[in-house]
Image: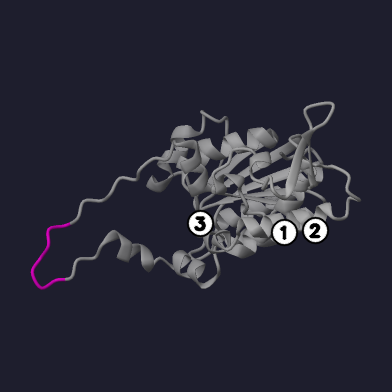
Amino acid sequence: MEQKNYTIALLIDADNVSYKYMNALYKELIALGKITYKRMYGDFTQPTARGWRQIVNDYAITPVQQFTYTTGKNATDFRIIIDAMDILYTKNVDAFCIMSSDSDYTGIAKRLKESNIFIIGAGEKKTPVSFVNACDRFFQLDKLAGYAKDKEEPVKPARKPAVKGVKQETPLEIEKIEPEKVEAEREESVEDTTKKIHKENIEELSIKILENTDGKPYPLSMLVSKIYQAYPQFNFKDFGVKKAQDFFSKDVFVITTGKTTEKYISLK
């Protein structure tokens, strides 16, 4: 388990990510610490923002209306980056969570990390790996929603009656030509990198760490933190376990409990 005492600023790009993931993400953040800043940014006059408007009071989120002043420029991104720097200089938080699937936040994530801030990313499977790797932890929202069993099924648009000789344009075909999705496809996504993580990768890293402890039991929480440093997108739940201690092979590792409830791990 990780240290769970962060003071977190949650910044949401409501133009980029769906409100339906909020419940699952909120539970993960509460487990990591206390959320002090809760802001969502976007143009809430648009019909697509209806879901966010509906839940703003459920989580006591402060909406920040951001009109699009120039075509082709994302004013929301700029405002989030500016506010992140303002919050950083207040020195009231030691962690940021940026809820977005946009690689434009890679730069601000790196900058905050340079100030010794713990960076949490939260985006869908299309999130480019550049943003994922700039974070200390990354939550893949579509997976979180599945774990929490509160995933909402999107309403499927009714298909128009087929006209003989005319090719029907399906929702999937329309989605493929959206510029932001085309851009995401050019870069490896978090889904791609997650598939490359095997249990052997995690155990090999753990063995290397434990080999430098002179045979002494090592705090499991510290080992988990180092695993997340190497693999920000890693999640134990992907391997069918609820607790980190259940992940490690009993043929290689030994899990013990200290004088308190602290768990320790060592090599056999």
Report crowding for label 2: few under 14, some 14 to 19, many 20 or more residues within 10 A (C-alpha): few
Whether residue 103 can be seen here: yes
Q: Which callout, 1 or 3, points at the residue further toward the start of the chain?
A: 3
Specify the amino acid type for callout 1: Glu
Q: Nearer the viewer, residue 186 or 56?
A: 186
Discs 1/3, front: 1
Specify the amino acid type for callout 3: Lys
From the viewer's perspective, is 179 left or right of 195? Answer: left
- Which residue is found at the position 54% from the left and 61% from the top? 195
- Outermost residue on the right side: it is 214
Residue hosting label 3: 125
Residue hosting label 1: 204
How would you classify the magenta stretch by its main secondary structure?
loop
Report crowding for label 3: few under 14, some 14 to 19, many 20 or more residues within 10 A (C-alpha): some
Q: Is residue 107 above or below residue 84?
A: below
For the record, the magenta segment spans 160-166
Whether residue 65 can be seen here: no
Do residues under tags 2 and 1 come within 8 Å of each other at their CB atoms? yes
From the viewer's perspective, is 253 left or right of 156? Answer: right
Q: Which callout, 2 or 3, points at the residue further toward the start of the chain?
A: 3
- Which residue is found at the position 78% from the left and 35% from the top? 256
